[in-house]
């Protein structure tokens, strides 16, 4: 997906476009302002000539030869006329002029440079006016100057503009306008969408992405996405996430804010193809930029969502391509991701890695590396953790290890893991009991696959009951297990030295 084309197409029209059409239709009587000595003859003469240039080529020729006068006239009219309807008309003409040709922003930069000002300094004060259309037209012009201009907005101007955007996205001012009866709820949400469109334009520029993050902008985006906003605003905010994800450093900030779980939840509930498309695009560029996102996506069950999406038909080829890319990459990651960081953190979760048959078949023996480092961590978790999820996952992993590694049973017994698993067979948590029972069964039987086949078609509740009954048949001596001396070659390593210093 191309950034430039995508951003230009993403800026919404809605209420701003409707109001702008109305404003254009109401021509201004410039002669009356001249007669009232509110504008100069020079400005009156130029604005009338400008309005008469309906042909794009003629207008471009005028701006090329009299660009400085154009900027001067627009700024003079905007700052010397107080009538709201006329100010709206001026801002609409400026916005139209810039939209027709992005390079025309240079007109305002050249004029501002002569006066030792910045191009946006003439428009920033407009953000404090009461009329919403005026305010948001000024905001659009500022965004276009900042995004398309040859100079970057910096310092206090940029901080002021970004703070204004954050305030508007929080909707506090617009909610106040709704309560005061100045604007409808529908109009309020559409004005917020216009603000989001300004942010989309700004974040096209890499330097502004860094500034937005430094201004706590990611937290602002997360706040909007967490508040069940409408699908259009949802799309725009995720669009901003997509833009941020193009910078590796920004990806790290997004990861800290747990953006993947939020996007995963939205993807699960999304009924709009455009929202699905932008989430997939954000996931793709995140995965291409930083490998860490693969684990986050796997843990949030994005792989399963992708498999479901892959069964559907889409008109947009980007969606199909992104689904295929993510399925391939996440499928590889499920097999390649190491459990070392998760084990050392002491916070085990039911990520697909734990339940991947291929992963255990290919990687069970790796748990023996570094003098059984990972197995010692696993058994230590079974001993000291009081988190039911950690205990359930740890018991499950012990069972998978002995199932896929021929000498695994002896190793686990020497580490004391068998007794630790058995201790949890009567745990108060059902999942801990169930996974402990399964692990013990794998420790005791010689051909686990036969027992697995016998239980495969049973509902979960029946499956668990079946496991309990089979254990009572196969292992009558469990109540009085034998203790064994633990060889020093396996138990000799201090668990603290391999990363377990604290377990929640």
Image (tube, helix red, strand yellow):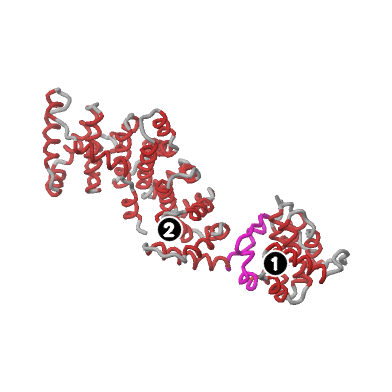
Q: Looking at the figure, which quarter contains the N terminus?
A: bottom left
Label 1 crowd (10 A; few <14 / some 14-19 / many >=20): few
Vertical relation: 208 (above or below) 421: above
**Residue 213 sits inside the magenta stretch:** no
Question: In the depicted view, which residue is nearer to us: 316 or 170?
Answer: 316
Tell me where residue 149 sits by quadrant.
top left
Which one is closest to the eye, mark 2 or mark 1?
A: 2
Tell me where residue 121 sits by quadrant.
top left
Label 2 crowd (10 A; few <14 / some 14-19 / many >=20): many
Region rendered in magenta? 335-362
Question: In the depicted view, which residue is nearer to us: 377 or 283?
Answer: 283
Vertical relation: 8 (above or below) 132: below
Work out how far the residue at label 2 is from the one at label 1, CA to CA, in angstroms: 40 Å
What residue is pinned by disc 1? 370
* Label 2 SS: helix
**Residue 347 sits inside the magenta stretch:** yes
Q: Main secondary structure of the magenta part?
A: helix
What residue is pinned by disc 2? 281
Label annotation for residue 81: none
Q: Is any part of residue 246 visible from this angle?
A: no
- x and y, in percent, of residue 484 in the image: 86, 67
């Amino acid at each position: 997906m191309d950034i430039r084309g995508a951003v230009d197409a993403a800026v919404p029209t809605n209420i701003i476009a409707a109001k702008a059409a109305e404003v254009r239709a109401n021509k201004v009587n410039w002669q009356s302002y001249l007669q009232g000595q509110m504008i100069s003859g020079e400005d009156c003469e130029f604005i009338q000539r400008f309005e008469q240039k309906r042909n794009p080529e003629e207008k471009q020729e005028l701006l090329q030869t009299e660009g400085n006068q154009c900027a001067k006239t627009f700024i003079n009219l905007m700052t010397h006329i107080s009538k709201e309807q006329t100010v709206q008309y001026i801002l609409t003409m400026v916005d139209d002029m810039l939209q027709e040709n992005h390079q025309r922003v240079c007109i305002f930069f050249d004029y501002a440079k002569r006066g030792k000002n910045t191009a946006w300094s003439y428009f920033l004060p407009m953000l404090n006016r009461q009329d919403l259309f005026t305010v948001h037209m000024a905001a659009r012009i500022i965004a276009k100057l900042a995004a398309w201009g040859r100079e970057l907005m910096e310092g206090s101007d940029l901080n002021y503009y970004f703070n204004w955007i954050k305030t508007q996205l929080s909707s506090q001012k617009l909610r106040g306008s709704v309560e005061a009866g100045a604007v409808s709820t529908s109009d309020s949400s559409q004005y917020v969408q216009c603000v989001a469109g300004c942010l989309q334009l700004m974040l096209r520029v890499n330097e502004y992405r860094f500034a937005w993050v430094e201004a706590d902008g990611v937290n602002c985006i997360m706040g909007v996405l967490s508040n069940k906003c409408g699908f259009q605003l949802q799309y725009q905010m995720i669009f901003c996430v997509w833009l941020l994800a193009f910078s590796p450093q920004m990806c790290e900030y997004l990861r800290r804010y747990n953006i993947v779980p939020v996007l995963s939840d939205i993807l699960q509930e999304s009924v709009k193809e455009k929202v699905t498309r932008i989430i997939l695009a954000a996931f793709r560029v995140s995965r291409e930029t930083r490998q860490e996102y693969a684990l986050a996506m796997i843990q949030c069950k994005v792989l399963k969502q992708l498999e479901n999406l892959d069964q559907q038909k889409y008109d947009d080829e980007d969606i199909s391509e992104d689904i295929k890319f993510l399925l391939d990459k996440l499928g590889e990651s499920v097999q390649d991701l190491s459990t070392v960081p998760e084990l050392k953190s002491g916070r085990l979760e039911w990520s697909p890695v734990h339940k991947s048959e291929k992963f255990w078949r290919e990687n069970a023996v790796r748990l023996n590396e570094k003098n059984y480092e990972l197995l010692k961590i696993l058994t230590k978790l079974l001993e000291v953790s009081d988190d039911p999820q950690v205990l359930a996952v740890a018991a499950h992993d012990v069972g998978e290890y002995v199932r896929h590694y021929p000498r695994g049973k002896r190793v686990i017994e020497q580490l004391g893991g068998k007794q630790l698993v058995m201790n949890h067979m009567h745990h108060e948590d059902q999942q801990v009991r169930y996974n402990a029972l399964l692990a013990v069964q794998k420790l005791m039987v010689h051909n686990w696959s036969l027992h697995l086949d016998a239980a495969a078609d049973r509902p979960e509740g029946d499956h668990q009951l079946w496991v309990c009954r089979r254990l009572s048949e196969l292992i009558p001596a469990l109540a009085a297990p034998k203790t064994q001396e633990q060889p020093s070659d396996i138990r000799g390593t201090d668990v603290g030295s391999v990363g377990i210093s604290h377990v929640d």
